[in-house]
């Protein structure tokens, strides 16, 4: 089973590759969405299937292949000249780098904020030119993209992964997830700094990352009007 739905694009999709709004904690978001208690350990580990998002044709798409930013000198020009109606954008510092995050579509997070499960990420390169460094996608609308202290949190299938930007590259810093065989037996995995996955003995690493995710802030996207 693949450990990612869409993770770091330079390793999965192999691409080269706003204004900040109000945020709510992921913990508050999850509490609002989950009306029933989890009935199994699998449910407790971020196992919900993705929910439908209206007009989801661009959700999870490689927007760097759709959006031509060659004439754009600033993030503002990308927003004003290139983004299409329905797309969303926000500014976020990832690592020590200011980034423009663009989503294929956003949705009301039940608190007035517009959240997203995917993001194509743009930064200024060493020459000051906007460039795409990759893309991420979360597992479903119950677990939107979130960030805290320069770390981007992404809910992968049965787990969590985290990212930072270092020297102009989008890098996976940690990932922890659970895989299930046909009999429902669990196997736990953990990786660090983009290294190979290692089988571990317990959910401890995954639980620790989930707790950090719940404490992070949901990214709030401004949506381009129709």
Image (cartoon, rainbow, N blue to C red):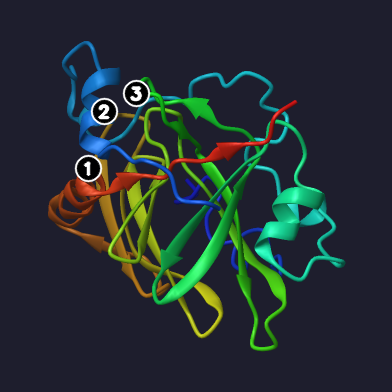
Which of the 4 image quarters holds residue 155? top left
> Going 42% across and 30% down the picture, which residue do you hit?
113
Mark 1 and 2 residues: CB-CB less than 8 Å, in contact? yes
Q: Secondary structure at mark 1?
A: helix
Q: Secondary structure at mark 2?
A: helix
Q: Residues within 10 Å of mark 3 (few under 14, many from 20)?
A: few
Q: Earlier in the sequence, mark 2 or mark 3?
A: 2
Q: Are marks 2 and 3 in contact (CB under 8 Å)?
A: no
Q: Which residue is situated farthest in the top direction here?
A: 36
Q: Residue at x 30, y 34 (%)?
A: 46
**Which of 208 and 186 lies nearest the eye of the viewer?**
208
Query: What secondary structure is marked by label 3?
Result: loop
Q: On residue 30, which mark appears?
A: 2
148 or 214: nearer the viewer? 148
- The tag earlier along the polypeptide, 1 or 3, is 3
Q: Residue 44 has which mark?
A: none
For residue 214, which numbered disc appears in the image?
Answer: 1
Badge 1 crowding class, 10 Å Cα cut-off, few under 14, some 14 to 19, many 20 or more, is: some
Q: Position of residue 168 (x, y in %)?
A: 56, 80
Query: What residue do we see at 57% from left, 59% from top?
Result: 100
Number of labels in the image equals 3
The percent position of residue 27, horizontal first and vertical second, equals 21, 35
Residue that mark 3 sits on: 111
Whole-percent x and y of residue 15? Answer: 71, 65
Tags 1 and 3 in contact by the CB under 8 Å rule?
A: no
């Amino acid at each position: 089973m693949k450990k990612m739905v869409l993770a770091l694009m330079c390793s999965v999709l192999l691409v080269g590759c706003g204004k900040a709004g109000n945020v709510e904690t992921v913990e508050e978001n999850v509490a609002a969405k989950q009306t029933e208690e989890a009935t199994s350990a699998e449910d407790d580990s971020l196992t919900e299937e993705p929910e439908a998002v209206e007009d989801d044709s661009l959700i999870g798409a490689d927007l760097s292949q759709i959006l031509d930013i060659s004439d754009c000198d600033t993030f503002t020009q990308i927003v004003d000249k290139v983004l299409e109606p329905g797309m969303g954008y926000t500014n976020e510092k990832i690592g020590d780098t200011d980034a423009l995050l663009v989503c294929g579509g956003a949705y009301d997070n039940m608190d007035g904020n517009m959240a997203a499960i995917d993001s194509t990420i743009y930064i200024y390169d060493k020459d000051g030119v906007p460039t795409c460094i990759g893309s991420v996608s979360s597992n479903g609308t119950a677990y939107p993209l979130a960030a805290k202290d320069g770390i981007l949190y992404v809910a992968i299938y049965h787990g969590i992964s985290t990212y930072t930007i270092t020297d102009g590259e989008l890098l996976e810093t940690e990932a922890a997830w659970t895989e299930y065989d046909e009999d429902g037996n669990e196997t736990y995995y953990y990786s660090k700094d983009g290294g190979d996955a290692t089988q571990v003995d317990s959910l401890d690493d995954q639980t620790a990352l989930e707790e950090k995710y719940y404490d992070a802030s949901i990214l709030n996207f401004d949506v381009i009007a129709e």
